[in-house]
Structures are given as C-alpha cells and as structure tokens.
C-alpha cells in the first residue's frame, strides 16, 4: 500500500475518520485478506461515524442546555412524582417533534422539570434534531438587546432553526408589554414549524394572569396549551431527596 501518500490525502481532505480506521487496518494482519471493496466500505463507515459524532457535538454545544448530562435512560419512575410511564415512553419516542406537538412540564421547584426537559432535548439531539434552550426571561432580555443593536432578525432566525425550543422558568419574572409582544411573536413563528417545551412552577390555569394582557394571553395559550402533552410533576424536591441520600451514605 502507498501508505504515506494516502495519509497525506486523508489529512488534506480532513477525512480523520477514514485516516484513523486506515491506520488501524495497517496494524491488523487479518485485514490483509480483505477485498478492496471491504476496505473501502470500512473506511467510509468510519468517516460517516466521525461526521455524525461531530454533528452531535455541534448540536449539543449550540443547544445551550442547562443540564447536558441528562438522559431518558436515567428517568426515575420510583420517585413519587406522578409520572405516567405510558405518557413518558410516548414522549421518549419523539413523535411529538414530527407532529409539532408542545410539551408543558409543571410542578414545584426541584421536582425535576428542567432535568426532564433536558433529557428529552438530548434524545432529540441524538436523532439529529436541533434544540435551543433558554430561560424565558433571558430570551426576552436578549431580544431587547438585539432590537437595540439591529441583530433581532438574526436572533429570530436562530430561534426558528431549532425544531425544539425549550423555555425554562416560565412565569418566574413579570412580563413587560414589549416582552408579551415578543413572546407572542415567538410562539406565532413556531406554529406549524416547531415544538415548544415549557417548564413552569405555575399551574397552567395561572398562565393567563401571568401573561397579563387578555387578548395576547388568549392568543399565546391557544397556540401552546391545546396542542401539548401536559406533564405535571409532584412530590418533594428531587434536590432535597438527593441531598438526603448523600447524607445517609456519608
């Protein structure tokens, strides 16, 4: 084999997956009996794996998830949080993304709303689905800044590219008149094009008063709530529960 020229070509074309697999094959005596077609297939498979791995890293980095280590395999059904296993398994399958259905997680602080939202976001990223995470108050702040410096269209394009938009801590900070309008436009832009995942300490029946202006509240809730999985979480704070477990083990 023309090893050195081949390596140079891999490097110039930035085919790192193929290069690494080629080096492995050179060191493996058993590979000498492989046909040319088999070698080419192995090299292409290695490069494809490398490309997919880079894409996952890029999607994870751009998602800005608060808890990027969360995953659906670690969902704890034993905790008394009121989880409906059938519903959770259905959400895990991600059909809601294709069908543009929203997810609303409600419950007191510490019950695992953000963690679950991040776990489902990670599952989306594994399937190559772009996700974007924001605390609602932070998103509205960024939109206000972007409006001032002229970058608002760019920010809205960025939000629109995410097939799943996570809005965390919905209802924590009071909305301004401008914030209400921005929120309506965000939700309107996503109607029919992308799902929204919301976490909130407020029960859904209090969202209307949180939004404040009746006409805008009606418009936002009509687009969000009637086409959504509702996941109400109950029980004691998961953070307190984990803290107790650590104390018992120490």
Image: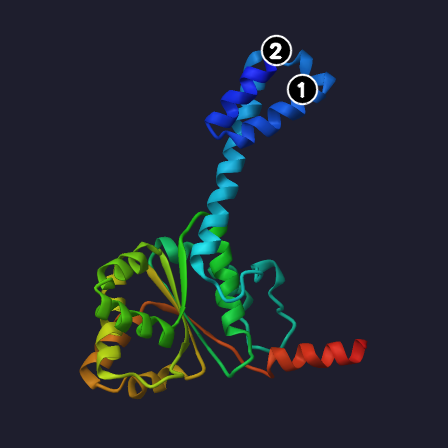
> Could one spot residue 222 in this view of the protein?
no
The relative height of residue 10 versus residue 182 in the rendered view (above or below) is: above
Please say if the residues under marks 2 and 1 sit with CB atoms less than 8 Å apart.
yes
Name the residue rendered at 50%, 29% in the picture: 15
The answer, for residue 178, to whether it is visible in the render is yes
Q: Is residue 33 left or right of residue 214?
A: right
Name the residue that disc number 2 marks.
Answer: 1
Q: Which residue is found at the position 53% from the left and 36% from the top?
A: 49
How is the rendered protein coloured?
rainbow
Q: Residue furthest left?
A: 215
Name which quarter of the figure residue 30 lies in.
top right
The C terminus, quarter of image: bottom right
Q: Residue at x 65, y 72 (%)?
A: 78
Picture coordinates of residue 89, whole percent (x, y):
52, 60
Residue 92, how many percent across, how many down?
Answer: 50, 58
**Secondary structure at numbered mark 1:** helix
Q: Position of residue 241 (x, y in %)?
A: 67, 80
- Identify residue for label 1: 26
Of the image marks 2 and 1, the number of the one nearer the N terminus: 2
Residue 239 is left or right of residue 12, and the answer is right
Question: Where does the N terminus fall, quadrant-wise?
Answer: top right
Q: For residue 234, what is the image quadrant?
A: bottom right
């Amino acid at each position: 084999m023309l090893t050195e020229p081949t390596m140079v070509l891999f490097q110039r074309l930035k085919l790192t997956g193929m290069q690494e697999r080629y080096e492995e094959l050179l060191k493996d005596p058993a590979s000498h009996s492989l046909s040319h077609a088999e070698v080419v297939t192995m090299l292409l498979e290695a490069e494809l794996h490398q490309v997919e791995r880079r894409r996952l890293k890029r999607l994870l980095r751009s998602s800005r998830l608060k808890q990027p280590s969360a995953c659906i395999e670690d969902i704890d059904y034993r905790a008394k949080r009121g989880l409906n296993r059938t519903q959770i398994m259905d959400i895990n399958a991600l059909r809601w993304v294709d069908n543009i259905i929203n997810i609303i997680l409600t419950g007191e602080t510490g019950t695992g709303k953000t963690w679950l939202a991040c776990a489902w976001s990670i599952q989306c990223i594994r399937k190559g689905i772009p996700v974007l995470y924001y605390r609602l108050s932070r998103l509205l702040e960024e939109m206000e800044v972007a409006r001032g410096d002229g970058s608002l269209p760019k920010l809205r394009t960025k939000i629109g590219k995410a097939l799943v938009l996570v809005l965390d801590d919905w209802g924590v900070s009071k909305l301004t008149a401008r914030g209400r309008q921005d929120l309506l436009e965000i939700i309107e832009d996503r109607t029919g094009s992308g799902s929204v995942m919301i976490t909130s300490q407020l029960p859904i029946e209090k969202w209307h008063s949180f939004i404040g202006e009746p006409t805008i509240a009606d418009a936002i809730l009509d687009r969000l709530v009637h086409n959504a999985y509702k996941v109400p979480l109950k029980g004691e704070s998961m953070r307190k529960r984990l803290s107790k477990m650590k104390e018992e083990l120490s």
